[in-house]
Amino acid sequence: MKLEGIHHVTAITGDAPGNVEFYGGVLGLRMVKKTVNQDDPTVYHLFYADERGSAGSDITFFEYPGVPRGRAGDGMVHRVVFRVADREALDFWEKRLAREGTPTTRSETSLLLTDPEGLDLELVMDHSGDEPLRAEAPDVPIESAIRGFEGVRAYSSRPEASVELFEGTLGFGSGGGHSWTVRGTQRGGFYRFDAPPQRRALSGAGTVHHVAWASPMDEHEQWQRKVAAAGMEVTPVIDRFYFRSIYFREPSGVLFEIATLGPGFTADEDPATLGEALSLPPNYEHLRDKLVDVLTPLPNPRAARSAS
Ligand code: ZN
């Protein structure tokens, strides 16, 4: 059994319209699902990904309207790393982000930036050989588009505590130091620990809530048993409608999820119109009219940008 790299990364936004404008507009990802938090249906859960809503490309946000900014600290993911094709693509993003008013730091092989709420992102050149998972934004040339996740970096003050779980149970491959590769038959990515800053961790807008690793459908229950057998406090399998999930906190404190590669975001929407309407899990469908009244209206940056 091998995990197929990152399935999705979920972070927190206090400003859903601004979040849509940045990830769906500036970064050119496709909003593939506009749904509600399954634990609180009065707020959004927003999903941005490639054109098909593929696992491996999917960054998602819980909306807590107006929540103050957090800051990443010990036991939290602090940077999400995406792939782009090559140096020309980095050049493209450097210019585009400057035009959009997003400061960047450029090196030979990477471009660092921060989202409007303080989440650190990085674009790196893709040497993976994995299928590029790209969205078709009207104003981003396809050859420069973001191609899915390369990895995530987290802070840990005791990275050794996680080694046995990672290498013995989860099948992470040691990448040297406190860095691991997580590669299955289709895709891979990296997970890395950095020394934490002095300041206390604070969950809030612009911080990562959890990282999910991808599992083939037929291996998911086995993962649940395997993680439980390793002594982790792991949830039962939870049906998230678009995929099934288990959750556990790895020993360094980062919340992990293992999510299935199916059924996916086309379970309740046509691929052509993914993310355009509000999708509700069947058990919330009867609340649709009420929810539409309380949810924040969102822009459609793709439509706006293709019109201009
Ligand atoms: Zn998740």
Image (cartoon, rainbow, N blue to C red):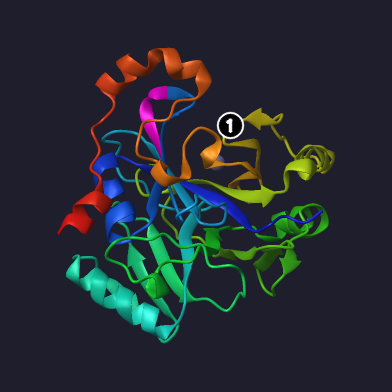
* Numbered label tally: 1
Residue 71 painted magenta = no
User: Seen from this angle, which residue lies furthest left?
Assistant: 308
Circle 1: element type:
loop
Q: Position of residue 250 (x, y in %)?
A: 66, 47
Left or right position of 67 against 145: left
Q: Which residues are magenta?
A: 41-47
Q: Residue at image x 37%, y 71%?
A: 112
Q: Residue at image x 30%, y 36%?
A: 67
User: Seen from this angle, which residue lies furthest top?
Assistant: 286
Q: Residue tagged by mark 1?
A: 240
In-front residue for pair 33/149: 33
Amino acid identity at mark 1? Arg
Quarter of the image for residue 232 reads top right
Q: Position of residue 32 (x, y in %)?
A: 43, 45
Q: Position of residue 73 (x, y in %)?
A: 47, 53
Q: Is mark 1 within 8 Å of ligand 1?
A: yes
| Screen quadrant of the C terminus | bottom left
Relative vertical location of residue 256 with respect to residue 189 in this rendering, above or below: above
